[in-house]
Amino acid sequence: QWVIQQLLQDAMQGRLEAGKHLVIQQLADRYQVSPTPIREALVALEGLGVVELLPNRGAVVRKLTAIDIREISQVRQALETTAVRLACGQCDLQQLDRLHSRCQSLVDRKRFTQVIVSEAQQIDNDLHDFIALSCGNHMLQRELGRLKLLYRAGRDAAWANRQQSGDYLRIREEATEHLAILDALLARDRKAAARAMAHHIHCGMKYWNRSLTAANATTA
């Protein structure tokens, strides 16, 4: 999974260029692993829509488009709103309270640093993992687990692109969205939890799209 994650991050953040032919031995040298996990990772990334495996030509990185981002977000919204509905009333209240306090501290913060960015990413990971584990549907848990590398690589790429210009606004916005989800879970309000999750994912999609547009304009 580490190789999949590294390849995915490098593809999302442009270190592996779109349209670039990927040579397995070069990638093995790059990540200091044998060719076998590289081949396995490329198959997994094809399943996520990040690379294309072409007959007799190997693998190439796909160019991510606004349509791709919208479709990824539609799938994520369907899965995560279902998960949060199922998790409502099943969550450990102490863990909910701890997550709430962590999110509130981000909303209240006046200044952001890279350390805080890392903490915000970890809070996002922890919240979505907690909901998946609390939903009680093992098939849904597995599918969310399979796709979360894609979601998080997209989030991290978007944040990295925007932060180059000193834009940290998304951190506070996302923490506020997280608080709305947590408030609904604490109130055991399934409809409110699903609405809050759908809003959170929609806002993330818009931010990712803005970041992609800005990155394309810079490289044009």
Image (cartoon, rainbow, N blue to C red):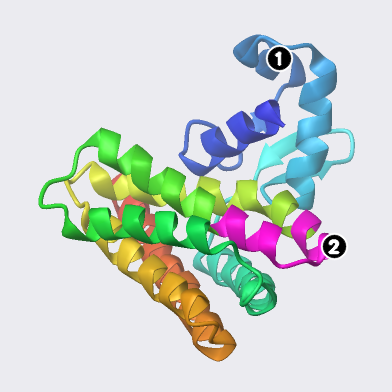
The stretch drawn in magenta includes residue 123:
no
What is the secondary structure assignment of the residue under circle 2? helix
Give whichever of 201, 190 is nearer the camera: 190
Q: Which residues are magenta?
A: 128-142
Q: Is residue 220 visible?
A: no
Taking 186 as reference, is 151 above or below it? above
* Residue lying farthest to the right in this orientation: 55
Q: Residue at x 51, y 56 (%)?
A: 95
Give residue 55's quadrant in the image. top right
Judge whether 24 appears above or below 5 on screen: above
Query: Which residue is at a point 69% across and 33% down the rendered structure image?
Result: 4
Place of residue 111 in the rendered image (x, y in percent of width and height, measured from the top left): 12, 46
Disc 2/disc 1 C-alpha distance (Å): 32 Å
Q: Identity of the amino acid at label 2?
A: Met
- Residue type highlighted by circle 1: Ala
The image quarter containing residue 54 is top right
Label 2 with label 1: CB-CB less than 8 Å: no
